[in-house]
Amino acid sequence: MRLLVTLLLLLVLSGCSTTYDLGDEWRPLSAVIERPSLPFVSDTATTTIGSHVYTSDLKQWLADYPPGSIEFQAVLRHEREHARRQFGYLGLPGELAKFAWITRYLGSANFRWREEQRGFYQAITFLH
């Protein structure tokens, strides 16, 4: 079931079009992309899948995290950590690693919590 939810989520997100391109300093992240509202997903959530950061309201997201601000840098450090870990998961090749990481993230509350702690560590140490 979780695999089906993951596949459906990836299919829905593939149709997004409004974007804010990120500079090379945020690699492997490349863009913040506006996504449609999704069932069971908070409209205020910032979500990273591979090199893309998704939000339901890009204009509001950019107002909350103005480019160049410390808030922008902190949230992107958090999301960049997710992207790095997705692409390096279990030593698998890129897309396969990302798929395996997302599947585990959706299926394990303990794994999800550890991954969020890693992201918040990046943001907090920057803000400190």
Image (spheres, helix red, strand yellow):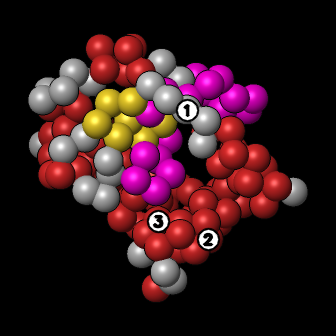
Amino acid at dot 2: Ala
Quadrant of res 102: bottom right
Q: Which mark is residue 86?
A: 3
Q: Main secondary structure of the magenta part?
A: loop
- Which residue lies at the image location 22% right of the left edge and 50% below the top edge? 26
Q: Secondary structure at mark 3?
A: helix
Amino acid at dot 3: Gln
Chain part drawn in magenta: 33-52
Whole-percent x, y for residue 68 in the image: 12, 29
Q: Secondary structure at mark 1?
A: loop
Closer to the N terminus: mark 2 or mark 3? 3
Q: CA distance from mark 2 to mark 3?
A: 8 Å
Whole-percent x, y for residue 64 in the image: 31, 18
Task: Read off the residue under disc 1.
Answer: 16
Please say whether residue 41 is one of the residues in the magenta stretch: yes
Amino acid at dot 1: Cys
Closer to the N terminus: mark 1 or mark 2? 1
- Circles 2 and 3: CB distance less than 8 Å? no
- Which residue lies at the image location 76% right of the left edge and 47% below the top edge? 8
* Residue at the extreme right: 1
- Which residue lies at the image location 21% right of the left edge and 21% below the top edge? 66
- The C terminus - image quarter: top left
Whole-percent x, y for residue 37 in the image: 65, 23
Q: Secondary structure at mark 2?
A: helix
- Which residue lies at the image location 48% right of the left edge and 18% below the top edge? 57
Task: Read off the residue under disc 2.
Answer: 100
Residue 64 against residue 92 in the figure, above or below: above
Please say whether residue 102 is one of the residues in the magenta stretch: no
Observer-side mark, 1 or 2, equals 1
- Circles 3 and 1: CB distance less than 8 Å? no
- Within 10 Å of disc 3 (Cα), the crowding (few <14, some 14-19, many 20+) is many
Q: Is residue 117 left or right of residue 26?
A: right
